Image (cartoon, rainbow, N blue to C red):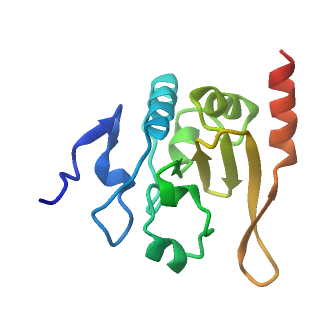
Amino acid sequence: MAPDLQVRIAYRLKYSELVSPGSKRAIYTFDLLRAWEKLRRRLDFPIIIVRGGGYRTPAYNDRIGGSPRSRHLTGEAIDPGVSTFYENGLDPYSKGAFAVFLSSGFHGIGRFENRLHLDVRPDPTFWEYYIDENGRLRNRPDEQAAKWFDQLNQN
């Protein structure tokens, strides 16, 4: 029996939003759902998950050049678009948003032009994506986020 794609699996989150493109399958962890619920209740505005921003099948992940160790493969990551953050007066790349992501349980935070990567890895890790000279998506440590993390932990 095929899964009901419209079933809600968490506060304001449908199964279909985590399904890998070209599939009707989604894998997600309890920690991801718990962090998502905390985030949604704290922000209380719509957050759109970009296509392929939930679970990814290995085939889809390979096709888009995703990391072979991607947390999307294990149901521990979600990629929200940023437009609704701005529409609701919150800069998703600000220290305030960063603090909300962390306090919701997202410890892996990657930033790139029009999207975010949030995951529930155990240790805080922050990076920014960039396009290298060969047109490939790469990442490097996010020094600004590391500074914010240090500031937040001093208080």
Relative to 42, residue 65 above or below: below
Give percent across and percent down for residue 127: 76, 52
Give percent across and percent down for residue 71: 56, 55
Q: Quadrant of the image for the C terminus?
A: top right
Q: How many marks?
A: 0
In the picture, measured across the screen, residue 126 lies left or right of residue 57, that is right
Residues 89 and 15: in front is 15
Residue at horizontal 82 percent and vertical 81 percent from the top: 133
Residues 74 and 133: in front is 74
Residue at horizontal 47 percent and vertical 71 percent from the top: 58
Residue at horizontal 80 percent and vertical 24 percent from the top: 152
Give percent across and percent down for residue 112: 68, 57
In the picture, measured across the screen, residue 17 lies left or right of residue 53, that is left
Considering every residue shown, the one lying at the far left of the view is: 1
In the picture, measured across the screen, residue 20 lies left or right of residue 155, that is left
In the picture, measured across the screen, residue 125 lies left or right of residue 78, that is right
Residues 97 and 151: in front is 151
Q: Quadrant of the image for the N terminus?
A: bottom left
Relative to 8, residue 128 above or below: below
Give percent across and percent down for residue 68: 60, 69
Relative to 52, residue 116 above or below: above
Residue at horizontal 46 percent and vertical 51 percent from the top: 75
Considering every residue shown, the one lying at the far bottom of the view is: 134
Considering every residue shown, the one lying at the far top of the view is: 155
Task: Name the image quarter holding residue 29.
Answer: top left
Residues 116 and 123: in front is 123
